[in-house]
Image (spheres, helix red, strand yellow):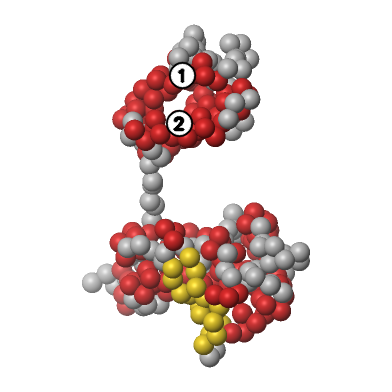
């Protein structure tokens, strides 16, 4: 690339033409920035540009620009042979000081976007035995996939027909979720874990990516696009609230820091036709 340099420190002062990431969205962003500064992009220019984008564009657009510029700047650092981690930390500090952190966008989960009880039945029928057990555990615990794969056997305690499972979630917050004794015993028999509930055949925790791929493939079999582990968590919450379970109980089971989070995500208060046309009338 013309004007490309192997000295990443020039980005702080002299400026460089930024390398293009492979991602199409990021590539378009970096081309735009390079065209604005054909003589070379400096770090202060990046900070000013991000501040302008944050002020004028949507939060999601700002997040894309932020991610694209981060990616490109790290490519400059990596190509220089210098310690890109140090550069990343310095850049993150500069962004934080400038109030340019990634904006968290909380979107409510739409009822149309979650699985029905029938969907879950069909998914379980189509899954192979190991994937079926993983999905069953996701539906019973409503755990994030990272939480599920981190469950240690020592943290599973039987209580009659159920097994209490201690999970450490976001913010190192602990909570207890439940598996049926039948599911727990089946998982133990199938996965033969020595430390973790879900282990590979060489006794290492299951790989998150492989689990996601396996679940995605089941979705293809039953005609559900982009089936992913977190959808079972969303579906659990929606179905429980719809069944009349108290939102406080659901919120605690999900491990949300605040009940407001649960309400924001799962308050499906939209009317349906059956409610509007009660007894065939609207009055």
Image location (x, y in percent) of residue 13: 45, 14
Quarter of the image containing the N terminus? top right
Residue labelled with disc 2? 90
Q: Secondary structure beneath disc 2?
A: helix
Quick check: marks 2 and 1 in contact, CB under 8 Å?
Answer: no
Residue nearest the observer in this picture, 222 or 276:
222
Task: Decide which of tag 2 and tag 1 comes sooner along the chain.
Answer: 1
Left or right: 166, with 220 as reference point: left
Q: Residues within 10 Å of mark 1 (few under 14, many from 20)?
A: few
Tell me if residue 245 comes above or below residue 76 in the rendering.
below
Residue ranking furthest to the bottom: 160
Query: In this figure, which residue is indicated by the disc labeled 1?
Result: 12
User: For residue 192, what is the image quadrant?
Assistant: bottom right
The residue sitting at the right extreme is: 202
Say which residue appears at 38% left-offset and 47% top-offset.
105
In the rendered image, residue 85, in percent from the top left (x then y), is placed at 54, 34
Residue 112 in view of the camera: no
Q: CA distance from mark 2 to mark 1?
A: 11 Å
For the C terminus, the image quarter is bottom left
Report the residue at 44% width, 34% height from top. 92
Q: Is residue 226 visible?
A: yes
Which residue is at 51% across, 16% downward? Answer: 10
């Amino acid at each position: 690339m013309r004007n490309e340099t192997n000295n990443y420190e020039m980005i702080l002062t002299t400026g460089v033409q930024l390398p293009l990431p492979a991602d199409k969205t990021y590539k378009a962003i970096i081309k735009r920035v390079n065209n604005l500064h054909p003589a070379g992009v400096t770090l202060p220019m990046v900070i000013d540009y991000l501040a302008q984008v944050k002020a004028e564009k949507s939060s999601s657009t700002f997040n894309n620009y932020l991610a694209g510029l981060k990616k490109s700047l790290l490519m400059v650092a990596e190509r220089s042979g210098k310690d890109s981690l140090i550069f990343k930390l310095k850049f993150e500090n500069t962004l934080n000081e400038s109030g340019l952190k990634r904006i968290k966008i909380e979107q409510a989960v739409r009822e149309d976007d979650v699985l029905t009880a029938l969907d879950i039945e069909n998914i379980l029928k189509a899954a192979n035995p190991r994937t079926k057990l993983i999905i069953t555990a996701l539906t019973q615990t409503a755990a994030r996939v990272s939480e599920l794969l981190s469950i240690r056997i020592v943290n599973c305690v039987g209580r009659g027909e159920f097994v209490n499972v201690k999970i450490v979630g976001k913010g190192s917050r602990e909570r207890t979720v439940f598996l049926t004794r039948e599911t727990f015993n089946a998982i133990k028999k199938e996965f033969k874990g020595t430390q973790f509930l879900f282990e590979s055949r060489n006794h290492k925790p299951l790989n998150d990516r492989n689990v996601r791929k396996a679940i995605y493939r089941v979705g293809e079999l039953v005609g559900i696009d982009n089936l992913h582990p977190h959808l079972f968590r969303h579906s659990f919450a929606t179905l429980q609230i719809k069944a009349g379970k108290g939102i406080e109980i659901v919120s605690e089971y999900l491990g949300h820091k605040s009940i407001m989070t649960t309400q924001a995500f799962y308050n499906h208060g939209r009317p349906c036709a059956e409610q509007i046309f009660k007894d065939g009338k609207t009055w």
